[in-house]
Image: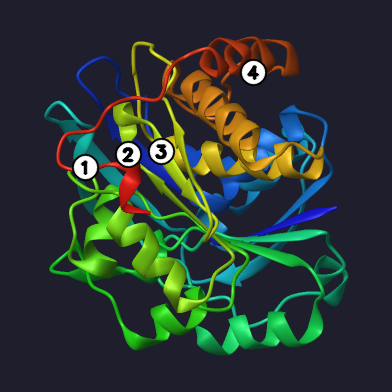
Amino acid sequence: MITAVGNPVYDIIVTPHVSTNGRVLSGCSTNFALVLAKLGIPVSLVGSAGEDFAGQFEDDLKRFGICYQLLPSRQTGGFSLRYYGDHGERELTLLGEADPIATFSSEFLKADWIMLGPILREIDGELFAWIKKNSAAKIFLDPQGLLRGVRGGKIYHESTPEVKKIISQVDVVKPNELETKVLTGIDPRIDPYTPAKEIKSWGPKVVIITLAELGSVIYDGVEFFEIPAYETKAVDATGAGDTYAGGFVTATVKGFPLRKAGLFASSVASIMVENSGPDFPLSWEEALRRTEILDKIKRPERSGASLSKK
């Protein structure tokens, strides 16, 4: 069993290609869980939501076959996401903030992997320490929600000593390009290797930096793996990194080596961005077909950085 921890959200999404009809189910842990459920991997989701969306949330998760523990909250979290630019740049405006996760049922600690996918600081060092103390699961961290704060209804990003401490104790950490720059001060679109090595030095076993259309870089302390992006039309980039995480953990559970797990994760993410919302049509057959295509692509050249830097 896999457990995903992090608050679900109901977002309004506007891109140059599509806009949602009202608020739709999303969130880091939620999108991760959707991937596993669609690929037939038993997964549970733990998060907080208010009565405003609790009924819809329960209906949605039952529809996708995801087990869950819904914790009470004053309201349900959500964002208005408006995309612009050429690299998935977006403006986030807060629609609602759910309560932090203090604890949850111990049955969800009995997992092979626990994915921590906070959306807005609902996971803190105290909860992380409780999970580490009471579970033998491997931990995958998407740090996005640990780095976010709210000021005047707008989202800002900053790193803290607590974030670095949490990262130091996980098995896999996966920041995107913005989060990598917040954590290290280095732009990974120019040089992904130096920040990957810096984050690895803090203590995680594997570092994955996702770079939108430039693909991703995986570093295990010995070798860098360059993972290309599957070339496609990005209709809605929301959840791309979350579904990458879901693909990576799925592939790891199935015994894929690091590079192939990255290729599979990239393939899964490409299916998500071709669609909008939780009903993206994911199948093993299509994900593996794209994985085989990516496997034949030569390592992309990056200006300003070289694998020789390892």
Relative side of 4 to 43, left or right: left
Q: Are marks 3 and 2 in contact (CB under 8 Å)?
A: yes
Q: Indicate whether 46 appears above or below 13.
A: below
The amino acid marked with disc number 2 is Leu
The amino acid marked with disc number 1 is Arg
Q: Which residue position is annotated with label 1?
A: 189
Marker disc for residue 114: none
Q: Which residue position is annotated with label 3?
A: 216
Q: CA distance from mark 2 to mark 4?
A: 19 Å
Q: Nearer the viewer, residue 196 or 32?
A: 196
Q: Are marks 3 and 1 in contact (CB under 8 Å)?
A: no
The amino acid marked with disc number 3 is Ser
Q: Nearer the viewer, residue 39 or 254?
A: 254
> Which secondary structure, mark 1?
loop
> Which secondary structure, mark 4?
helix
Q: Position of residue 4 (x, y in %)?
A: 67, 57
Q: Are marks 2 and 4 in contact (CB under 8 Å)?
A: no
Q: Nearer the viewer, mark 4 or mark 3?
A: 3
Q: CA distance from mark 3 to mark 1?
A: 10 Å
The residue carrying pointer 4 sits among few (fewer than 14), some (14 to 19) or many (20 or more) residues within 10 Å by Cα, namely many
Q: Nearer the viewer, residue 287 or 300?
A: 300
Q: Which residue position is annotated with label 4?
A: 287
> Which circle's residue, 4 or 1, is located before the other in the chain?
1
> Which secondary structure, mark 3?
strand
Please tell me how many numbered marks the rendered image carries. Answer: 4
